[in-house]
Image (cartoon, helix red, strand yellow):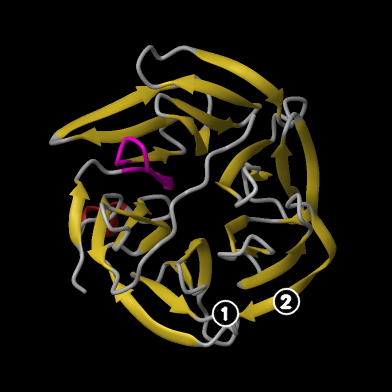
């Protein structure tokens, strides 16, 4: 299960990897670089934006729904054209978008946080069929947004608290009831960043500062780790023709210059997961 480099461009804050099932292509973001990145075959490509962008879902072969620090917008991968879907905390210049992912019902979840990670300044929203609704509030660093294979449950973490929570969802994908603590990593001193579920319902959680992605079963039991040659592992995604490849973004943020120059910090990786992922659902606009 050794990791290899998928893309050697270094991201200040790599995030939001998305395997587009129709294009069979990985997209990801450098949040602080304000860029969307990909590789088309062996050719690297990037799109530069004038504000932070952090996460996306796919709408059709050529269209992504992208979350920025002020809005959700459609983005055409062929033309570069964009169109605003709705505002996202545009009246709050001290916040930005962070981790996000589409749910099984075709909704899109996106976390926001203070640009200086101020305590309790973040939230999680869900966009579904024209409605943007805040579903979690008072969170500091929202991450690990992912969903059970049957679509009946959602997970999210607060990286600052080193805790992962779960939520029951109704048939339309909206939360019902209060969030429950699902996994507390305080004693292990593990920081849960981005996460994704596999076809068996296991969670694969990137551990910021931990050089690894940890796999946990549906009861929260630690199964194993996959090591990566970057300290700040930020978010995983399953992809490849058989959805058996685990991709991972990483970050330079928070590393001193000497540490940042070592190893492959900030690059994007892939590894054989020994597990099978689930196709990312289409976002229904």
Q: Residues within 10 Å of mark 2 (few under 14, many from 20)?
A: some
Between 262 and 22, the one nearer to me in the picture: 22
Q: Quadrant of residue 275?
A: bottom left
Q: Residue at x 31, y 27 (%)?
A: 46
Residue 229 visible? The answer is no
Q: Is residue 202 above or below residue 88?
A: below
Q: Residues within 10 Å of mark 1 (few under 14, many from 20)?
A: some
Residue 69: image location, x then y, percent = 61, 31
Secondary structure at numbered mark 1: loop
Secondary structure at numbered mark 2: strand
Judge left or right: residue 26 versus residue 264.
Answer: right
Q: Is residue 271 above or below residue 12?
A: below
Q: Tell me if residue 163 is in the magenta stretch.
A: no
Q: Residue furthest right?
A: 177
Instruction: Give the CA separation, mark 1 to mark 2.
Output: 13 Å
Which residue does the numbered mark 2 point to in the structure image? 181
Which residue does the numbered mark 1 point to in the structure image? 218
């Amino acid at each position: 299960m050794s990791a290899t480099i998928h893309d050697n461009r270094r991201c200040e804050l790599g995030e939001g990897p998305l395997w587009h099932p129709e294009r069979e292509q990985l997209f990801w973001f450098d949040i602080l670089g304000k860029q969307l990145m990909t590789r088309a075959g062996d050719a690297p490509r990037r799109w530069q934006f004038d504000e932070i962008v952090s996460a996306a879902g796919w709408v059709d072969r050529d269209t992504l729904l992208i979350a920025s620090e002020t809005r959700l917008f459609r983005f055409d991968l062929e033309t570069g054209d964009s169109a605003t879907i709705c505002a996202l905390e545009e009246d709050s210049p001290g916040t930005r978008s962070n981790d996000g992912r589409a749910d099984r019902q075709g909704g899109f979840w996106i976390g926001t946080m203070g640009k200086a990670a101020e305590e309790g300044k973040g939230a999680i929203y869900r966009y579904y069929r024209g409605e943007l609704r805040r579903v979690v509030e008072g969170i500091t660093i929202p991450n690990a947004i992912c969903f059970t294979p049957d679509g009946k449950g959602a997970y999210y973490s607060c990286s600052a608290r080193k805790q992962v929570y779960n939520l029951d969802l109704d048939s339309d994908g909206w939360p019902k009831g209060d969030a429950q603590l699902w996994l507390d990593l305080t004693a292990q001193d593990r920081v849960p960043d981005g996460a994704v579920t596999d076809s068996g319902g296991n969670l694969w959680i990137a551990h910021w500062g931990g050089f690894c992605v940890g796999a946990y079963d549906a009861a929260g039991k630690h199964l194993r780790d996959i090591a990566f040659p970057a300290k700040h592992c930020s978010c995983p995604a399953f992809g490849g023709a058989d959805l058996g490849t685990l991709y991972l973004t990483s970050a330079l943020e928070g590393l001193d210059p000497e540490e940042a120059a070592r190893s492959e910090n900030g690059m994007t990786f892939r590894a054989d997961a020994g597990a099978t992922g689930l196709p990312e659902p289409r976002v229904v606009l």
